[in-house]
Amino acid sequence: MTRLIFLGPPGSGKGTQAAVISGSYSFPHISTGDILRQAVSQGTELGQKAQTYMDRGDLVPDELILGIVRDRLSEPDAKTGWLLDGFPRNVEQATYLESLLDGIGQTCDRVLNLQVSDDSIVKRLLERGRKDDNEEVIRHRLQVYRQQTAPLIDFYQSRQKLVSVNGDRSVEEVTQSLKAVVNSLAH
Ligand code: B4P
């Protein structure tokens, strides 16, 4: 049973690597970014509320996210492991997740922190060209990351969960490093 969190700045490759790793080990890939983008494209109430924040590069308010993660983690496929990609994004979300997992007798095994330089991030995201990938919004997302998400590095370091991986390499090289961590976990 493996439970992982992928942490890192926007464009660090969380989604890219989470798709590969969850495919290789067959545990569900839970991406709050994907859930939100799907809600936007379907025009649901959640999507309509979330869109303005996403377009600006701000975090969507916690009250829109926490219930989604709680419900998703209670689905049958998440009983035997999961990979959270893009959640938690701030200390409030991390604290919520910790008490949620406590309540269901679970804990996360490792937090994999992808480290990538700002220059590579801007280059990658401009190439990706999603709606929220223009330079001004990318710079704002990096600022939001530093203020709200980067404190989670200390949060998980102090709980001895954090493993940092150099994400400034090819997709295959980063995958190899991540697999080495997953394989080192006793199951
Ligand atoms: P996310 O969907 O989480 O996306 P991201 O941070 O932009 O990208 P990620 O790190 O997954 O990068 P990717 O693999 O795609 O967030 C989007 C928005 O949703 C947030 O701004 C926020 O508004 C909202 N949101 C999501 N979760 C939230 C939460 N919990 N609370 C509040 N709001 C939330 O890679 C990027 C590009 O780089 C791709 O084109 C990829 O092909 C390329 N790439 C990847 N690895 C590479 C490598 N090694 N070398 C070269 N290129 C690489």
Image: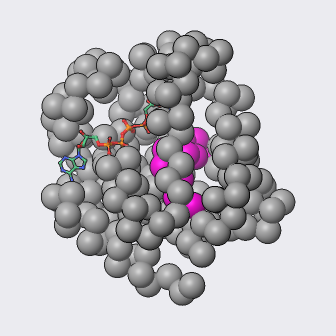
Direction from residue 151 to residue 17 in the image, left or right: left
Q: Is residue 151 visible?
A: no
Direction from residue 124 to residue 183 in the image, left or right: right
Between 88 and 45, the one nearer to me in the picture: 45
Between 148 and 37, the one nearer to me in the picture: 37
Direction from residue 142 to residue 81 in the image, left or right: right
Q: Quadrant of ligand 1?
A: top left
Find the magenta span and give its range: 82-91
**Colour scheme employed for the rendering of this structure:** one colour
- Residue at 44% from the left image edge and 61% from the top image edge: 22
Does the magenta run of residues contain 90? yes
- Residue at 28% from the left image edge and 65% from the top image edge: 175
- In this rendering, the answer to whether 65 lies above or below 42 is below
- Residue at 55% from the left image edge and 24% from the top image edge: 39
**Residue 111 picture location, percent across and down:** 50, 63
Direction from residue 138 to residue 185 in the image, left or right: right
**Residue 99 picture location, percent across and down:** 78, 55
Between 88 and 117, the one nearer to me in the picture: 88
Q: How many marks?
A: 0
Quadrant, the N terminus: bottom right
- In this rendering, the answer to whether 140 lies above or below 114 is above
- In this rendering, the answer to whether 34 lies above or below 117 is above
**Residue 116 picture location, percent across and down:** 26, 50
Quadrant, the C terminus: bottom right
Does the magenta run of residues contain 58? no
Q: Is residue 65 visible?
A: yes
- Residue at 65% from the left image edge and 15% from the top image edge: 45
User: On the image, which quarter does residue 113 sit in?
Assistant: bottom left
Q: Residue furthest right?
A: 103
